[in-house]
Image (spheres, grey):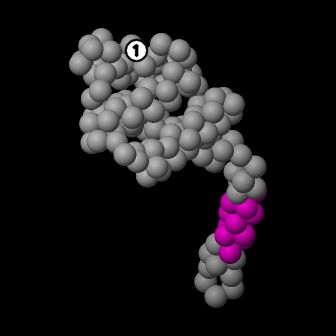
Amino acid sequence: MSKITIETKSHGSVELELDLLDADEYERLLNLTDELNQKLQNPTTYAGLSGPDAIRTQCRAIESFFDRFFGSGTSEKLFAGKDKNHLGAHLNAFARVAEEGVNAGKNLNGLADKYGFERVQNREQRRKQERNSNKKTRRNRGGGKNR
């Protein structure tokens, strides 16, 4: 379980708990992130909206992501007051969670490398290679008749 800290104007630092080594939670994050990206990139989402209304729509979509992933009321802690319609604050908070997702992927790969099946296989290959290279150096030490 890890904690991420998101800086806000109205509440200072807000800590959120995240356990992306839990497959179900990691999968939920990926699904909700994909859903949010599709909504934000879909041109019909903004059809007929003014620029300010489009920004508000993006803010509400990101708030929905936080409430669905971290629990109801999370967006209120993060985006109350001055940050309510501030797209930069919303995107920075989302980027912080996405960054943690990327880090979790790297951590999973690191754990797989450290403890995975390939490591055992590679260890056996290294041992075999060492035995073969030791045989070659023993043969070529120059301890024969021509000394």
Q: Quadrant of the C terminus?
A: bottom right
- Image-based side of 55 in relation to 135, left or right: left
Q: Residue furthest front?
A: 48
Q: Residue 69 at x, y = what percent?
A: 56, 25
Depth check, front residue: 108 or 136: 108
- Image-based side of 64 in relation to 128, left or right: left
- Image-based side of 124 in relation to 94, left or right: right
At 75% from the left and 55% from the top, the residue drawn is 121
Depth check, front residue: 65 or 55: 55
Which range of residues does the magenta coloring cover?
Answer: 124-136
Q: Is residue 128 magenta?
A: yes
Residue 121 shows in the view: yes
Q: Pointer 1: residues within 10 angstroms few (<14), some, or many (20+)? A: some
Total numbered labels placed on residues in the image: 1
Q: Is residue 115 above or below residue 128?
A: above
At 75% from the left and 49% from the top, the residue drawn is 117
- Image-based side of 42 in relation to 131, left or right: left
Q: Residue 28 at x, y = what percent?
A: 63, 33
Q: Is residue 9 magenta?
A: no
Q: Is residue 141 above or below residue 91?
A: below
Q: Residue furthest bottom?
A: 146
Callout 1: SS: helix
Q: Amino acid at mark 1?
A: Glu
At 63% from the left and 48% from the top, the residue drawn is 113
Which residue corresponds to mark 1? 76
